[in-house]
Image (spheres, grey):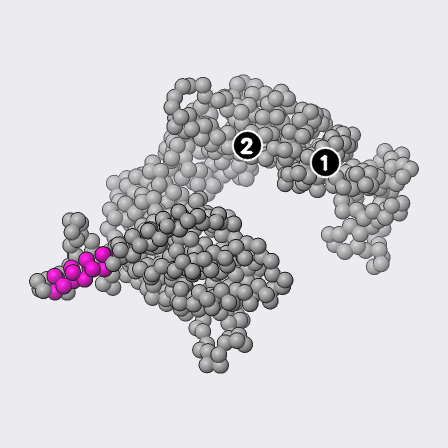
Amino acid sequence: MPKPRSKRQAIREERKKKRQQDDVARTESNREAKRRRRNEDGDDAEADGQTAAFDDGHEQSQTPGGLLQTEREFFGMLSEQEQEYFRSVDEQLDIDNFPSQEERQLFLSSVFAEAQGKELKLACSQSCSRLMERLILMSNTRQKKQLFEQFGGHFLNLVQHRFASHCCETLFLQSAPIVTRELAGDRDDAPAEEDGPDEKPLPFMEELFLLTLDEFEGRLNFLLTDRFASHTLRVLLVILSGRPLDQAQTKSLIHSKKKEKISAPWKFGGETEADSQLRAVPNSFNLATKKIINDSVAGLSPTELRVLATHPTGNPVLQLLLELDIAINSKSADESGEMTLLWHLLPGAPASLKDATTPASDFVNSMLYDTIGSRLLETLIVHCPGKVFKVLYKQIFEPRIHSFLRNDTASYPAIRVLNRLSKEDLVAAVKQTIPEFGKLVSLSRFNVIKALLERCQARQAYDEVKALTKGLVDECGDDAKSLVPRLCLAPLSKEDGDKQQQDSLAKNRSALISHGSHLVTAMLAIPESPRKAVQASISALSEEQVLELATSSAPTSHVIVDALSTPSPNKAFHKALVASLRPHIMELANSDHGNKIISAIVSVPSRSEGISLPFHIKESIMTELGQHEQELRDSFIGRRIWRTWKGDLWRNRRVEWIAWAKEVDSVPEPTVIPTRQQQPKPGTWTQKSKSNGFQHDNPNSIKVDARKWAGKESNNSRDRGIKGMT
């Protein structure tokens, strides 16, 4: 809840409001005076489409629509009473103390009725724009379309506004599924009963999106590099292309890392699986996407396009445009006569890439070592046609692949190249890299080593996997025991320096540990030599080092979690690893990262091929957790661990907890086919123990009664498994 406003704060806000009104009035009067002077002096610059001069000496070009890029519409400010009302609405939505969904809808309808005519003020208000986003999340189809109509004609200014641009993004994203539903003939925007009989029918959502795009026509060049409008433009491109809206890759593409997550107590229609799948879009959206791509690069010279590729704001939009351009024009991509964005970046490709002096080769070489431009080059490498990639690799990357992999910036496009190589080309690249493998380790290019190992395993180049593993172990200290400490436990720097330098070193150390941990996790997933090397190194760690791995960061804790779930030829590996953590159970349970390990221990089977953990160790851990039950219940992390270990079941029905916790090998299916009455439903476990009526939720559990373990007297795993079933 917001803090109550003091009298002094109210006075300050009143003065601030008065100053803003004075500034607006002064600006309007200056504009009127300039217009009168231009008319009196007969200045025909405006009629001839020339540039308009300002008092500060800067000149700014005028857009075809006659609107200067620096001009912004002012929609007014909310009064004090209106701000207080909408603040109370926000508080009521936070509390969500409504008896039914009907009451919620009635309340929301009353809020929209009160906000009618004030939508633009709300969207541009610093204090109320978040409320507008929440209202959009909760609104129905008809209310969203009405907001489109209220924002219509002002979208060009709204998408460039600091606060209103977020409202536009939310409105577009929440309206995208409506286009798919209406395309299938499902419309749910009929007038409500309280609406008047003369209420006009609303247009299709497809038409509203196309009308919005019409407002941006001729102005895309400066919207690409606008601080706020570029994000909204990305959202529109994702919607027009039909890409999934709820994937992590899509969210990182359209939102910045500082994007504030706006939540709502409920959403109209709720979350659907369609948000994470490809959406059906009308053909007009594909045509609109092509027009946006053509208009964005139309009139741009090669130099201007290269500047845009290295622009911090324009580069992400250009990445998305390039990806969509290749996807839409994939059928005609072989014909270089059609000047799409790909051919603007690489004119004359693939033939021009064979000459190092052509603009296409010069563009690739200049983007390789640019921290921003290399991201566009990654997109180009991933999505370009096969015949372009082959020439690109043979002429530019193959001769210097080992050099690119060492470089801090060029290594990322080089990794993308490795992902598309055939087995023969990949083996050749590894042979070039192994003689200089020590430089990769000394420069901490762990992401490069990870990519090499994963691609060799995927291409079944097993000899290269062994060679890479041997080279990594040798460079880390001639012994597998030093592998994990070198990759995941980088020593702290003791160099003196100012605070800013220390923060930079700490951030760099965190990134190195993250990359090293990801490399170790990838090696655990690769059988034979990589997995054995990591497991041997983990077995040699001291108790303090294991605890540091478990609690220092999320990537290092995942190393322990994956080690617990990975088979090992050493039968004592998992037991020794848990024994190192056993004295620090409560410290791990209260740790932000270590609690994942406590939850993973209970999933380790007691007897299984390659993975086993004696049951008495689990029982001792549960006993210690039970002694600190209240401490665990007092925290969110502790409650999650208590639920994972089924603490209430352990405290109240100990025998049933043992039946759940003690696991064996997967029970083989009996040879006798059960009758219709005996056949359980697929994916369910419905059989119950005769002694206590406990319903198993673990198909690998041993049947336990009050007197003895079922099947314990037989050493045959098949017999033991069948006897354990009732």
| Residue 37: percent from left, percent from top | 12, 61
> x%, y% of residue 355?
28, 41
Q: From this viewpoint, is residue 184 visible?
A: yes
The circle drawn on residue 629 is 1
Main secondary structure along the magenta-highlighted residues: helix
Pointer 2 residue? 553
- Using the rendered image of the protein, determine whether residue 382 is visible from the camera's viewpoint: no
Closer to us: 714 or 266: 266
Is 32 inside the magenta-drawn segment? yes
Under mark 2, the amino acid is Ser
Position in image of residue 79 (x %, y %): 39, 60
Residue 674 lies left or right of residue 120; in this view the side is right
Per the image, label 2 sits on a secondary structure element best described as loop
- Residue type, label 1: Glu
Span of residues in magenta: 26-39
Identify which residue is drawn at 22% across, 56% down. 26
